[in-house]
Image (cartoon, rainbow, N blue to C red):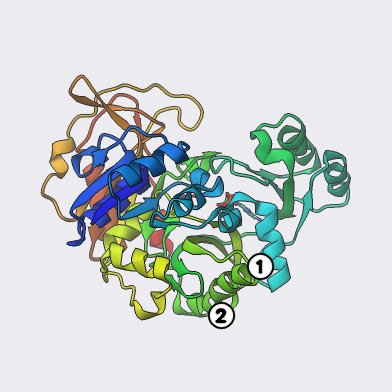
Amino acid sequence: MKVLIVGGGGREHAIAMSVKKSPKVEKLYCAPGNAGIAKIAECVPIKVDEFEKMAAFAKDNAIDLTIIGPDDPLAAGIVDVFERENLRVFGPRKNAAILEGSKAFSKDLMKKYGIPTAAYENFDDPAAALAYLETASYPIVLKADGLALGKGVLICQNKEEAQEGVKSIMEDKKFGSAGNRMVIEEFMTGREVSVLSFVDGKTIKIMSSAQDHKRAGDGDTGLNTGGMGTFSPSPFYTPEVDAFCQEQIFQKTVDAMREEGREFKGIIFFGLMLTEKGPKVLEYNARFGDPEAQVVLPRLKNDLIDIVEACIDGTLDQCEVSFEDNAAVCVVLASDGYPVSYEKGFEIKGLENFDGKEDYFCFHAGSAEKDGKIVTNGGRVLGITATGDDLKQAREKAYKATEWVQFDNKYMRHDIGKAIDEA
Ligand code: AMP
Ligand code: GLY
């Protein structure tokens, strides 16, 4: 079959790597892709927000299956456009992608269906939000309602900071129209775990757990980023935690969406906080996490195409989703200055060191080809993943492999997976 992947980051490279292994796939396209993906797929210069063009390409090239990677096109309804054209596509429709696209929606859903999450209030008027801050307790968390590249969350230590935050989100529109509404919620403490899952509208099968490192600097300092590194599985996602989540969170979410007339087919990514009072949902995403996908997919035993097709056909209950009994660590190599401002266009050297190595992966997040050379083309440039027998071995291997590639202004965190030592 012919498969098209929409997107062009590390997540899409990891999906492409996984899809490429399927004996069912004879031709793989990626739009727009990047210089790393171009080694295993034919990249097509169509942007992720050009839905009609994308669907026309799928039609003209007799694509059998399209897999949507990023959140923005899902939230804006790319799946609906494909379905209108009778094209087979994997991902939630617009009315279900709202699970990630609106934090106010997801908070109301959790409240209505008794899914554990932080206490909150929604606001569409800055004056009401400011009034609420007068009697709130601190620290407190402010969230722009809409998609904001993973950056629309402010943790405020006191009333003054929170007042500034409300103004910047709702009045100055720091995150654009994402800030037309906002959620103000209780600050929680605990370990964070990412659990990704396949969903066919009624059945949910979870993937092996992972943990991200969102802050830019060592020791969880600096600004929030898209994610600076991941490991999988999380040793903190114990069988007890899993049992709780299966009963109180996962199936309840899928059932709630169906109940609301918003049947969800695709990936639900549960951002969980393991609090003293038990696991609670921090956020939902309607897609694979990035860089979570870069540690989870290399460990997947199944043919990804089989699971994706089962999700579309509503037969996921007949699939057993299983993972290798190993571990993976991903260290992101970024451009110095990310997530604020950084230079691009530096040659990346040493990529050939990954050739032919089964337990090392160099996923491209922001790269491009220029004059026959591969150059940096984004804030996050590469995701260096290694698998190992256990987390410590995987971490050692991943850090060793970060030395195999060089480019100017290369920046990384040195403490990805430090939590492993505390497990
Ligand atoms: P989100 O985009 O909702 O995942 O938020 C980004 C990050 O902000 C999360 O990964 C947490 O580290 C932090 N965060 C979000 N909500 C809360 C909360 N209620 N309490 C504490 N930290 C939070
Ligand atoms: N790594 C977090 C995300 O994909 O949203």
| Residue lying farthest to the top in this orientation | 371
| Left or right position of 369 against 139 | left
Image coords of residue 79 (percent x, y) = 48, 52
Task: Give the crowd class for mark 1: few <14, some 14-19, many >=20 residues within 10 Å.
Answer: few
Q: Is residue 139 visible?
A: no
Q: Residue at x 39, y 61 (%)?
A: 420
Q: Which is nearer the eye, 266 or 238?
A: 266
| Circle 2 or circle 1, nearest the eye | 1
**In the image, which disc is placed on residue 260?**
1
Q: Give the side of residue 369 with respect to residue 258, left or right.
A: left
State left or right for residue 158 relative to residue 212: right
User: Residue 261, can we see it?
Assistant: yes
Mark sitting earlier along the chain (2/1): 2
C-alpha separation, residue under disc 2 versus residue under disc 1: 20 Å
Q: Residue at coordinates 29% horizontally, 62% vertically from top-left?
A: 305
Residue 331 on image: x %, y %: 34, 46
Task: Report how many numbered discs are placed on residues in the image.
Answer: 2
Name the residue type under label 1. Answer: Glu
Judged from the image, the secondary structure of the residue bearing numbered disc 1 is loop
Towards the viewer: 258 or 140: 258
Above or below, comparing residue 156 to residue 190 in the picture: above
The reply to whether callout 2 and callout 1 are in contact (CB within 8 Å) is: no
Residue 358 shown left or right of residue 236 in the figure = left
Type of amino acid under label 2: Glu
Percent coordinates x, y for residue 198 in the rendering? 43, 66
Q: Residue furthest left?
A: 356
Q: Residue 239 has which mark?
A: none
Percent x, y of residue 156: 71, 44
Question: Which residue position holds label 2?
Answer: 247
The residue nearer to you, when weighing 127 against 273, is 127
* Quadrant of the rendering where the N terminus is positioned: bottom left
Q: Residue at x 72, y 45 (%)?
A: 157
